Amino acid sequence: MTDPAVDAPQTPTGSAPRGLDLDRLAAYLATHRPELAGPLPAADRAAHAGPLAARLIAGGKSNLTYLLRAGDREVVLRRPPLGHVLATAHDMAREYRVISALAPTAVPVPEALLLCTDPDVLGAPFYLMEKVDGEVYRRREQTDALTAGQRRDLALAMMDTLADLHMVEPGAVGLGDFGRPDGYLGRQVRRWAGQLDRSRSRPLPGIDELRDALAGSVPEGANAGRIVHGDYRLDNLLATVEPVAVRAVLDWEMATLGDPLADLGLLLTYWDVLGDSDSAEGNPVADGIGPRAGFPTGAELIDRYAGRSDVDVGPLHWHVALGCFKLAVICEGIHYRHTLGQTLGGGFDRIGEMVAPLVEHGLHAVREK
């Protein structure tokens, strides 16, 4: 992964990024994946106290992602955030299972290498996956460097990949029991309402009204039963632009079987709501995306998706409202962890500012007919 790191590699004194105990990790790998626990090259041994070196990869606002160096090999480690872990969120086994299952499909995913569910090793479950070369496009200076054609092609490739995901038959890849499609949308509302209650730390005008409006108007979900990513957006992809291609889809912690319109609604929330908002400028979640950053409109993205998928896109307003509610709750949870000093890296100080515009737009969307 070429996304810049925010922590330096392990220091000469043997320290490691927060959330990793490299000595415990090395001991675990020596037993379970010894080829990943070998010594560093001779030139580097004097600068490192143990066989492993690691750095925190910037960008993730939820689960923590580290670039782990073992000898001349680099792999990626994922673990839950520090502190304040919401129930059922940040599920490492779930991420590991879905990327393993999707490996033989048209959906590009990193190779899954190892899953550890023993919290005694790092204080929480974790997994390892292969490093994939590519770039995570999330900052305005990155997307401004692209040509108009590259921005358009990248956005369309993003939609083609999402359509490919939704066309995968869950049972054919061993994911037939990955979720409970019946009642998925109603459970989504209840789940995020529960997450909201666990993350409240300040008044949030309108958010309870949005929750209640969603709960009172849940659609039937005719498309239910597809594999849903749960947080599909441009900066959860590793991509190249010469040629334009999606190299890997990342961050599968919210994946399940459900209604694919939930993925589309959330994507439009990022793209047209945050990406076209004054709050997007300089914001680490929405700064480099959407029409104001020179990308196609959300309507063009949906047209592209509909041309490749058999999913009935229908009216998306309810799903956009759900996306606004879900993202508002996620942002509030991150804001809460930031106030407790439990976030790593930069860019968290403005996450809380996104909650109010998300709630406002969600209320507008859920009232549409």
Image (spheres, grey):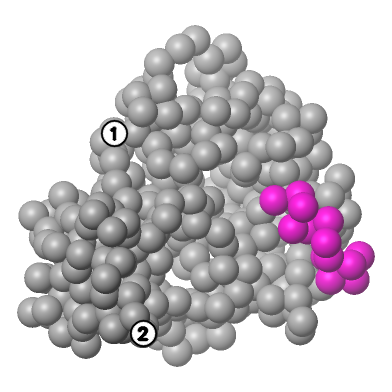
State the predominant SS element of the stretch in magenta.
Answer: helix
Q: Which mark is residue 84?
A: 1
Q: Which residue is mark 2?
A: 72
Of marks 1 and 2, the one in the foreground: 2
Does residue 10 show up magenta in the picture? no
What amino acid is at disc 1?
His
The residue positioned 22% from the left and 81% from the top of the image is: 39
Q: Position of residue 272 (x, y in %)?
A: 77, 44
Placement of 261 over or under 127, stated as above or below? above
Placement of 244 over or under 201, stated as above or below? below
Does residue 149 show up magenta in the picture? yes
The answer to whether any part of residue 158 appears in the image is yes
Q: Nearest the camera: 8 or 255?
A: 8
**Based on the displayed image, in which of its 4 quarters is residue 25 positioned?**
bottom left
Identify the mark nearer the N-term, 1 or 2.
2
Residue count near mark 2 (Cα–Cα under 10 Å), binned few <14, some 14–19, many ≥20 = few
Quadrant the C terminus occupies: top right
What amino acid is at disc 2?
Asp
The residue positioned 56% from the left and 37% from the top of the image is: 347
Q: Nearest the camera: 62 or 100?
A: 62
Q: Are the residues flagged by discs 1 and 2 in contact, CB closer than 8 Å?
A: no
Placement of 264 over or under 200, stated as above or below? below
**Based on the displayed image, in which of its 4 quarters is residue 125 positioned?**
bottom left
Q: Secondary structure at mark 2?
A: loop
Q: Position of residue 216 (x, y in %)?
A: 53, 28
C-alpha separation, residue under disc 1 versus residue under disc 2: 35 Å
The answer to whether any part of residue 258 appears in the image is no
Tell me where the magenta segment starts and ends, as one range. Answer: 139-152
Q: Is residue 31 left or right of residue 50?
A: left
The residue positioned 56% from the left and 85% from the top of the image is: 106
Q: Position of residue 155 (x, y in %)?
A: 76, 65
